[in-house]
Image: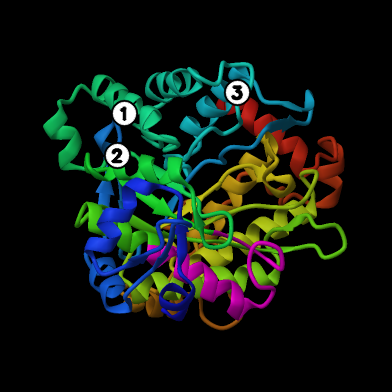
Amino acid sequence: MRILSEIGLTFHAQSAWDTLEANGCAVDRETGNVRFDPAAVEHFVAMAPGAFDMAARDPAKTVHFGGDSIVWGSASSAPNVLDQERGRRPGTGADFQELLRLGHMIPSLHVMGGHPVEPIDRPPNTRHLDSMFDWLTLSDKVLRVYGIGTTRVEDGLEMIKIGFGIDEAELNAVPHTMSVLNVNSPLLVDEPLLLGSIALARRGQATIVSPVAMSGAMSPITASGSLIQHNAKTIGVSAYLQMEVPGAPLFYGSLIAAVDMKSGAPAMSVPEVVTGAIAAGEMARFYDMPYRTWLGSTSNTVDSQAAYESMMSIMSAHMGGAHFVHHGHGWMQGGLTTSFEKAMLDADLIQMYDAIKPTIDFSDADEVINAIAEVGAGGHFLGSSHTMSRYQTEFHTPELSDWSNYELWEEQGSTRVIDRATHAWKELL
């Protein structure tokens, strides 16, 4: 609140100034600096709903954001694409479509969270139309629009009405899509993203208010400094959007990452990122807003680093109480590349972590005691009726792991995880 009231945020959108002034903010019309009344911020942030559904074209794939649910998205906005056979290359429309089809087939991927890779061969002025056409025709899962200005938003919503077969009233009644408002520069709110978010809110759609805090570069280097700046931007922008459209569905978004002080490159899924993700989740619950975080890796190839960095992200999403995990399948090289093999690896890791039981069911206790009595001292449970009734479903089996002994693994070709991931994505396509 001290950041918002004493330092303020700079809004480039002059169209926002009247609304901000009318709700108790001090606006410097020379610079766009806005200083907020803390009581007004808390009043308006409280108007954001604590949970909401988002409709998919297939109603069975509609998702819920809030409570204890966790929803996983695709990778988004990487300029490059990678697979083991074709190598790393700039993204094209064909790569975009292939990753979209793959995402449609991955069970752990619930939301098409954006361009899985940027289709840079498509003209920039019509790229959003081509992308929306692909989202609507190659998948029936929840999708995202890019809220850079109002044109992309309005075009996207009109296409959603056609693709879903709904009218304006049905579109506005329930969120059917979302966009991301990244507050990138310290304390500066970009005009095109803000206008896109307002256009979405006025038609009942959701916005993820998600500052990017690269500690030591875009935000103070300490965990406290990054969280303070990040929180100020998130709730300041969220309060403004609620001033414009009370009750608009919003996410408390977070992308807190570190910077490698030797190279200046982003350092994803390091311990500091885990701390930031869990802390941001606490703040989202404090303001009772659905929480969005992310899954990424800095690794340049699909190796053990890619696996443990992804698992750090997945762990922090669960521990932070995330409701939506953006960039959830295949994001690597600090967000510069989406990998087919890593998409499969991430899916496997997500499903493994999701399979961890939050509680233990003791409803079979009598049956368990009978089984123990049946086997007795010195026996084994492999053939017991208790085991035989459950052995096909009781344990989670990872898709990419090889549990065979060394000799059999060697006999079958000594395959690595990346080899099995290549086979897996080809099979799904």
Which is nearer the N-term, disc 2 or disc 3?
Answer: 3
Measured in 3D between alpha carbons, the distance from the residue under mark 1 to the one under mark 2, in whole angstroms, is: 8 Å
Does residue 349 appear to the left or right of 38 in the view shown?
A: right
Residue 143 x %, y %: 39, 35
Mark 1, other Cα within 10 Å: few <14 / some 14–19 / many ≥20: some
At mark 2, the secondary structure is helix
At mark 1, the secondary structure is helix
At mark 3, the secondary structure is loop
Does residue 396 appear to the left or right of 111 in the view shown?
A: right
Q: Amino acid at mark 3?
A: Pro
Dots 1 and 2: beta carbons under 8 Å?
Answer: yes
Write down the residue under mark 1: 154
Q: Which stretch is magenta?
A: 212-236
Residue at (58, 62) in percent of width and height? 186
Write down the residue under mark 2: 199
Mark 3, other Cα within 10 Å: few <14 / some 14–19 / many ≥20: many
Q: Is residue 186 above or below residue 275?
A: above
Q: Could you say which disc has been placed on residue 119 in the image?
A: 3
Q: Amino acid at mark 1?
A: Glu
Is residue 214 found inside the magenta-colored segment of the image?
yes
Is residue 183 found inside the magenta-colored segment of the image?
no
Residue at (37, 57) in percent of width and height? 251
Residue nearer the viewer, 253 or 190 = 190
Measured in 3D between alpha carbons, the distance from the residue under mark 2 to the one under mark 3, in whole angstroms, is: 25 Å
Is residue 301 in view from this perspective? yes
Residue nearer the viewer, 406 or 109 = 109
Q: Where, by quadrant of the figure, is residue 27 drawn? A: bottom left
Residue at (72, 48) in percent of width and height? 402
Measured in 3D between alpha carbons, the distance from the residue under mark 3 to the one under mark 1, in whole angstroms, is: 21 Å
Residue 327 x %, y %: 56, 46
Which is nearer the N-term, disc 3 or disc 1?
Answer: 3
